[in-house]
Image (spheres, grey):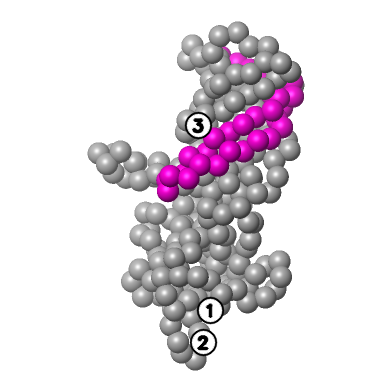
Amino acid sequence: MEIKIGTQLELEPTYTERVENFRCKVVEQKENIIYIDYPINVATKKTAFLIDGSEFRATFRTEDKHSFAFNTEVIGRKAGNIPMIMLHCPKEDDFIKIQRREYVRVETTVDVAIQFKDYKYQLVTTDISAGGLAVTLKGAIAFQDDDEVKLTIVLPFANGDAKYVVTDATVVRIYEKDDQKIATIQLTETDDVDQQHIVRFCFERQLVNRRKEINPFDA
């Protein structure tokens, strides 16, 4: 997919505790390189000077109002009438179509510790999003629909890093599916930083799942 000249990109740093957003425009594109003008920090309105090797999640909208995201990194600079920063542009297969008004829910397994009163459970998800998750229940459990619980979610990233998200949540529903008992849980007190970690994790896993669909023998 060719990103047209003048397209606005929004950049979010990945693998960082800081929640920041930068906006820039595409000035040139050649093969696997996107040239952008110097981005503006959305919060401070100041020009940002990105360091070579910095990794970002980039999002943009096409003329037909579809939104896409991809992972990128700063690979250099180019002098000219307009000073430009060079970003790596992945193949079209690595672009993910996103829905702006919905949290992306991804089918994946991650470890979750659930605490309800004096009870603690070590469980595994069947899917997860920045708004909630579903877990497979084992044995007897004390919590029921509408109960408030505390979660500790382990998010293992592809670079070997792991983030621990601790948040309050509410049990939405407990039901049986394919001879398994499932609990769907809504996150209720997730701060902005932890929510960004989950969004990035889901995006990363969605990209992995896409690659497996395209190249099943590489899985």
Amino acid residing under circle 1:
Asp
**CA separation, marks 2 and 1?**
7 Å
Amino acid residing under circle 3:
Val
Label disc, if present, on residue 111 of the rendered structure: none
- Where 47 falls versus 90 (above or below)? below
Verify whether residue 167 appears in magenta: yes
Write down the region rendered in magenta.
147-176
Residue that badge 2 annotates: 82
Residue 101, x across and y down, in percent:
64, 49
Residue ID at (45%, 87%)? 79
Residue that badge 3 annotates: 110
Tag 3–tag 2 contact (CB < 8 Å)? no
**CA separation, marks 3 and 2?**
45 Å
Amino acid residing under circle 2:
Ile
Residue ID at (39%, 54%)? 94
Residue that badge 1 annotates: 37
Where disc 2 sits, the SS reads: loop
Label 1 crowd bin: few (<14), some (14–19), many (20+), radius 10 Å: some
- Where 178 falls versus 79 (above or below)? above
Identify the mark nearer the N-term, 3 or 2.
2
Q: Nearer the viewer, mark 3 or mark 2?
A: 3
Residue ID at (56%, 75%)? 49
Q: Quadrant where the C terminus lies?
A: top left
Residue ID at (70%, 73%)? 45
Identify the mark nearer the N-term, 1 or 3.
1
Tag 2–tag 1 contact (CB < 8 Å)? yes
Residue 17, x across and y down, in percent:
61, 52
Q: Is residue 134 visible?
A: no
Q: Nearer the viewer, mark 1 or mark 3?
A: 3
Verify whether residue 166 appears in magenta: yes
**CA separation, marks 1 and 3?**
38 Å
